[in-house]
Image: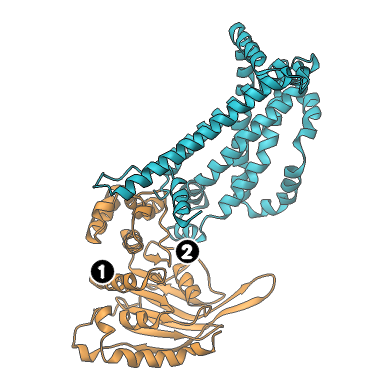
Chain colours: A orange, B cyan
Amino acid sequence: MLQTGPFPAVAIRDVTLNYFTPERETLALSNVSLDVAKGEFVAIVGSSGCGKSTLLTLVSGLLTPSRGSIQVDGIEVKAPSPRVGYMFQKDTLLDWRSIIDNVLLGAELLGLDRRRARQRAEELLKRYGLGEFMHSLPSQLSGGMRQRAALARTLCCEPELLLLDEPFSALDYQTRLALSDEIAAILSAEGKTVVLVTHDIGEAISMADRVIVMSRRPGRIKSEHKIAFPSFGAKRPTPFEARKCAEFPQYFQTIWDELDLHEVH
Amino acid sequence: MGTEAIAQSVASDRPAERPAAKPVARSPGYDSYLRALRRRALSIQAWQFGLVAGFLVLWEIAPRAGWINPMLTSYPSAVARTFMTMLQDGTLATHTWVTVSETVGGFGGGMLLGLACAVALWWSPYLYKVLDPFIVVLNAIPKIALVPIFYIWLGDVASIYAMAIAVSVFVTILMLYTGFQAIDPDKIKLARLFGGSRRQILYKIVLPGSVPTIISALKVNVGLALVGVVVGEFQAAKAGLGYLITYGSQIFQMNLVMTAIVVLAVISSLLFVIIQTVEAIMLRRHGAPR
């Protein structure tokens, strides 16, 4: 599944980020380096305020690092690019637009070919079980359906790299488990490169090929763990199955210990 | 009051917005609940009607019985006669039309000017920082104090529009700007991630997302514009309901004053109903939860 091209999908090199407020200067990230291979699913975990979401914003191009460089597919990131898709914690659907019009927002803003985008949007919505809700308003959909619509909106512009910023944390537990299974299946079928930021260790282990642990501010990479479930066999288990594998609690314990969560008040 | 009564009063606060569910088999309990609901609604209407009727009767009797001086209050019957005469000779229509057109013009002007200013302030946070204290102070000035100045500067017609705009524009700016700031930052981030320009963010996210705020501003302003117009007419006008009120009080014709006030009450209710209808339509089209 992992392709070895000339460039990694994401190359983060010695990235440092300071940000300023009138009260203080904050060192949010300090010398972070990370490579993500094409088709790889990497999860970044860390306690809140460790800068993991900031790192994602840097990769998206909305922020520029104070020092260091970030490349996506060998090209320096300077501004947001349609090759990178982003999903938020909230679905951020626009309440006044129908689901299909929400999915088409990206194409509209990017000035893409309307008819092609519409075709793809309809196809995606049908595939995600939202076919009959295309012309409904977001307020008529459940939380899980809304987040699936948000995924369709992200994928409609055919990004190669997906940045997921705690996309399940606003959902209730059952929906979260079901939706992470669905989204993992969709993303692995599409062969996308994914960077997931989460504070949920179980979610990270069950979905990712590799888990990166970040320290508290200033955020640095503390350790990384390749995730594999040999007890399940050669195939990758779905997130739900992964949670039942023998290796799962071991990974969980190791990462839990590294996060030092008990020191957080 | 038992919990049941409370539950009923809560339920009756939501009138027939939802289409009634398909009739299944109603239980006797549900039937009696519906009957109680209808009784309650009827008794409320009866009270409202009774209060108006009682007020009119008292107003008619009190001067006749010598409890109050009829010179000061007139009678409902006399007001009704004046109303009918003025309706027949067309003077009422003329004055009402003057006031309504001034109100609508001032209201529209205040809204458009306020919207344009709020957009400018949203566009440039620096401009907002510079102008913020001035807007707050201008909003706090009692605009009625400006009536004589406007009259001297702008003359008898333009000063009335200026008054209606002055009364409503600063509130509009502050309300709309606050509404623009309250748009979910993640939605703006989303548009920026798709390469959206500031202009696109304004048209696709901020303005459509502020429709509920714009409607509340409309609701506030329609009342304020009417106040501005009537006050402006007190000073400046040769026609209009505000003029009728000043004229009537100067010649001690309470019938005239009361008639004008009644018409003003009707106008403001009508304007409010219109805005409410607009609100219902816009909010439904805007994805408010049903």
In percent of width and height, residue B108 lies at: 59, 31
In percent of width and height, residue B23 lies at: 26, 44
- Label at residue A186: 1
Respond whether the residues carrying marks 2 and 1 are from the same subunit: yes
In the drawing, does residue B12 fall left or right of residue A64? left
In percent of width and height, residue A101 lies at: 35, 50
- Label at residue A79: 2
Q: Can you see residue A170?
A: yes
Other residues around mark 2 within 10 Å, as few (<14) / some (14–19) / many (≥20): some
The quadrant where residue A147 appears: bottom left
Q: Residue furthest front?
A: B65
Other residues around mark 1 within 10 Å, as few (<14) / some (14–19) / many (≥20): some
Instruction: Inspect the image, locate mark 2, and give the three-letter code of the amino acid beneath it.
Output: Ala
Viewer-nearest of discs 2 and 1? 1
Residue nearest the observer in this picture, B3 or B259? B3
Tell me which chain the residue with mark 1 is part of: A
